Image (cartoon, rainbow, N blue to C red):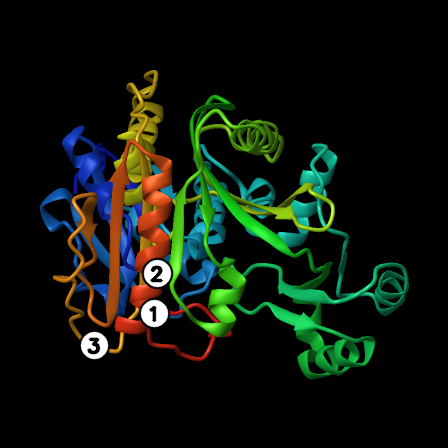
Amino acid sequence: MSDTADVVLCIASYEKGQAFLEQAASLGVSTILLTAEKLRDGRWPLASIAEVHTMSDTAEPAEILHRVQALARHTHIARVVALDEFDLEAAALVREDLRLPGMGQTTTRHFRDKLAMRFAAQRAGLAVPEFVSALNHEDLRSFIEAVPGPWLLKPRTSASAIGIRSIATPRELWRTLDELGERAAEFLLERFVEGDVYHVDSICWNRALQAQAVHKYGAPPMSLMQNGGVFTTRTVPRGTDLSRTLKALDAELVPALGMVSGVTHSEYIHSRADGKLYFLEIAARVGGAFIAELIEFSTGLNPWREWAKIECALLRRQEYSVHEVLQDYAGSVLCLARQQRPDLAPYTADEIVWELDKEHHAGLIVRSPSPQRVRELTEEYALRFASDFCAVMPAPDKPTS
């Protein structure tokens, strides 16, 4: 590639972000994809990518930096995008080293490190379940004396509910920390709050949120990760106090954590005990589990494509704005499937607008102008999926592609 062409480097340890790559190409921006060797032959939109390069499947940020430095000898890399959460640190390191715009390592920690994001959320005025680093034993003793259990022991830099452990007693806590050894410093301890979990997916431009989509999970992600089951999420009725409050919280949180322009996926829990909304976590990425498709059907905005538009606008020093947002409602139903190719033919509602095409997975999205109809369908289909398809696998300690 010419060393004078401005390109966007996309780093992907997992197979995702195809819509981002397609949108960038449609806007005339060249992208280079740096992905894991095992994903070289993945379902990438090759016609939309200028070059594909690979890194080792277990590449650490320093190794990725060396790989990018080699590419930068012959290519003018203007921007760096981490398509997956686990590439955020590497992207930040590359930006720091190549002196490129975008989030550096300190700001990135607010969107990767669960301990850092909790401190930042507290400073921004949000309610956060009581927490403490698992590093200092005296701090831990004081915490468990003051905060009644059960507690959650959470990896600081894992994604979603991966690796979270439920702790019922002090004895169980100390035994678990002994098992972790030096790795205990990579965890935090937090009061368990029971309640419904919501996610807010936002599009940010110049520190202002241009669009927000609010959805409610069926079973909490942590419960699904540990016990298996059917994943559902659906749009929260617009104009309700709950929807407005969640949007307002996110509008305070996102710029306070240092996001200037990009996309975010935040989670909050509505406590059954005290009725408060507590911050759980935030990520500077598009939500997983096909949430981008869900949002597109309800609003007309695909977060992957909007993110690509933002990166292209920043590259060209142009302005960005969202187009008119639809006001439909959508819900998704997903699960691991016992069958290699689950048969969704018996699911015949007119509101079904999308079906998942992935081996040993069953999934669909429904759309309607009625939030009640979406709720009815997602609840009915979740029960049917559990009977027709659902397979359960042991919860992973580490992410899998």
Q: Gap in Å between the C-alphas at discs 1 and 3?
A: 13 Å
Q: Is residue 60 left or right of residue 51?
A: right
Q: Is residue 385 left or right of residue 246?
A: left
Q: Nearer the viewer, residue 121 or 367?
A: 367
Can residue 76 be seen? no
Residue visible at 49% across and 44% down in the picture: 199
Which badge, 1 or 3, comes first in the chain's sequence? Answer: 3
Which badge, 3 or 2, comes first in the chain's sequence? Answer: 3
Dot 1, how many residues are within 10 Å of its Cα: few (below 14), some (14-19), or many (20+)? Answer: some
When asked about the image quadrant of residue 66, the answer is bottom left
Front position among marks 3 and 2: 2
Q: Which mark is residue 382?
A: 2
Q: Secondary structure at mark 3?
A: loop
Q: What residue is disc 3 on? A: 339
Q: Gap in Å between the C-alphas at discs 3 and 2?
A: 17 Å
Q: Are marks 3 and 2 in contact (CB under 8 Å)?
A: no
Q: Gap in Å between the C-alphas at discs 2 and 1?
A: 6 Å
Tell me the amino acid under the disc marked 3: Gln
**Figure disc tally:** 3
Q: Secondary structure at mark 2?
A: helix
Front position among marks 1 and 3: 1
Q: Nearer the viewer, residue 218 or 286?
A: 218
Q: Are marks 2 and 1 in contact (CB under 8 Å)?
A: yes
Tell me the amino acid under the disc marked 1: Ala
Percent from the top left, x then y, of residue 92? 48, 46
Q: Secondary structure at mark 1?
A: helix
Q: What residue is disc 1 on? A: 386
Percent from the top left, x then y, of residue 117? 64, 45
Tell me the amino acid under the disc marked 2: Ala
- Image quarter where the C terminus lies is bottom left
